[in-house]
Amino acid sequence: MTHDRILVVGAGPAGLEAARGAADLGKDVLLVEATDQLGGTPYAHYATLTPYLKDTHEAMGPMVEGVQTHPRIDVRLKTRLVASQGEAGQFVVTLQDDRGNQAQEAVGAVVIATGFRHFDPGRETQLYGYYEFDDVITLVDAEHMMQQGKIVRPSTGLPPERVAFIQCVGSRDRQIGNQWCSKVCCGIASKQSIEIKRMVPEAKVFIFYIDMRMYGFWEDQLYWKAQEEYKVNYVRGIVTEILKKGDKLLMKGEDTTMGRPVELLMDLIILSVGMEPSQGTLDMAQQFHVPRESHGFMATVGEPLDTVTTPVAGVFVAGAAAGPKDIEDSVSMGGAAAVKAVTFLNRLSQQLA
Amino acid sequence: MLSNLYPEVPLQEKQRLFDQVKADPRYESYLYGCYECGICVAACPSARFYDFSPRKITQTMAREDIEMFYEHLNDDIWNCSQCFSCTRCPRQNNPGGLITIMREVAVNNGLKSTKEALAGYTRIIYKIMTTGTQVSPDMLQEDAFPDWGPQVKEVASHLDLWRRALPPETLHTTGLSWQVEERTMLELYTIWKLTGVLDMISELDEGLHDIMEEVMDDALEDQGFTVG
């Protein structure tokens, strides 16, 4: 017997859209989320969304609410999937809530939308002193400040006069083992540079990069805008080292297009940390026996024309669990995964009928 | 940035000159932003022959790097041939135009390096501003153009004859490239004086300025004009 219900694991943009899509197509959906709220990483950690600089909670509010109030969606917060048995059409999963209570649920198909985690800049030797210097922070730390409507030097609590972003921290690096571009960090750094200039107009803001990857409309929506309207300085060259000098940070690198070494004093340095598979993504790959592709994210078959079907029948993936994705891609994949999962169940029922 | 070839010049002075360039009304439409693609350098004839990069000048201005700006102002801007091939820029920057503004600021402020760069052009400035024609046949002397070969001396010694061999009568000139109407010259003098171009020369070469002013004032006065 086929269970006519779809399990969605993870309630970020991809999972929300997958759940909403499958429910709107008439299936019952069980949405499992490990944290205590819907919305995922952007909702929890990002003050505004790229590239339109809209308040995240405002922008995602209708999406979150639509899922919360949908009669066909059963939302389980603070809940993890700890075991899975069975196969397509007849999965039996064990869920465990934060108090340790376990429950078994039967579902016919699964959409994994467990997303990414930010690279930990202290994990590898990058000489950036993230855990050493208060004023070396990550994009996420900056967003947390912006959620409170400010950007300051953590060491003094005062607005910075000189700010530098360092791109590709934990991305595009064979030594670290992350050979991919994380796609969104160029846009997020540019977005934040605009926001910093809006909050502290007299600040000098620099972005040190290897390539600026501002695909599509991000080119003029973010890159040109930051450069032309906000006078953000883009310098091609990656910083090798950050040292403490007085109460400032001394950055050493090469300005490759000007052909000279640079040493600059900064008040605040923001590391543009990239994406890695989240613990949830690794766990779900194991639980559902989905192989991981060469970079460690969840494998799909049929790329580039099918972005959501995994090699395991009845198991689909959406969003950054399958590799670095922006929100547009994640939501698009969520919709695609919903259609694939619903269609899969319908065909399975017809075959068995 | 690690760039300071002119440590003896105070930063405020460099900043003052930079601010003059930036205050030019053309500046805003000459500089948007640079993503360092290098198309301006690829198109630039000067870049093939000199250590000269319209990209670096544009980047320097966009980054507001005051020290580098002052280096360019002294060491680079006169290597530009002002052909504006660089305006192929995909961001619609005008590196050559930025250099035009920088040159004007350099001249207006009588920079030593500018005086040196333009010293060889005194005769040309005198000629074009007093006659409206740039290079006249009698300037083709072997001392001035040693690289033009041994024939220059021979040609120069019979210049009048060579010029009379040319069919158009207006080219039977040695002190001018061609005959210029007096009225045209008077209009030209009026333009130089009213637009401030003549004044620009005073910062560069006071002697040259005074000589040209006298020529212009005398000619205008002879015809009963008072300008300025």
Image (cartoon, coloured by chain):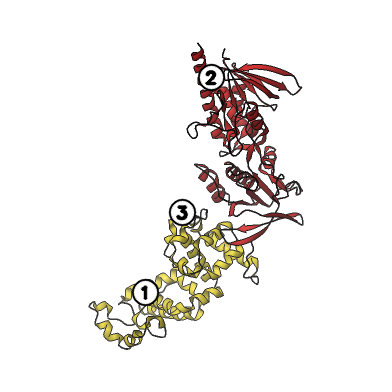
Give the image location of residue B51, x and y in percent.
51, 68
Give the image location of residue B201, x and y in percent.
48, 74
- Distance between mark 1 and mark 3 Cα atoms: 33 Å
Is there any visible trace of residue A199 in the rendered image?
A: no
Query: Quick one: which chain is yellow?
Result: B
Give the image location of residue A317, x and y in percent.
57, 29
The residue to which callout 1 is attached is: B132
Q: Nearer the viewer, mark 1 or mark 3?
A: 3
Q: Amino acid at mark 1?
A: Gly
Query: Quick one: which chain is red?
Result: A
Question: Pointer 3 indicates a residue of which chain?
Answer: B
SS at badge 3:
loop
B187 with respect to A232 (left or right): left
Q: Is residue B120 above or below residue A348?
A: below
- Distance between mark 2 and mark 3 Cα atoms: 48 Å
| Image quarter of residue A12 | top right
Q: Which mark is residue A90?
A: none
Q: Amino acid at mark 3?
A: Gln
On whether disc 2 and disc 3 are found on a single subunit, the reply is: no
Viewer-nearest residue: B114 or A65: A65
Q: Is residue B37 above or below residue B116?
A: above
SS at badge 2:
helix
- Distance between mark 2 and mark 1 Cα atoms: 80 Å
| Image quarter of residue A275 | top right
Q: Which mark is residue A24?
A: 2
Q: Amino acid at mark 2?
A: Asp
Quarter holding the N terminus of chain A is top right
Q: Which mark is residue B92?
A: 3
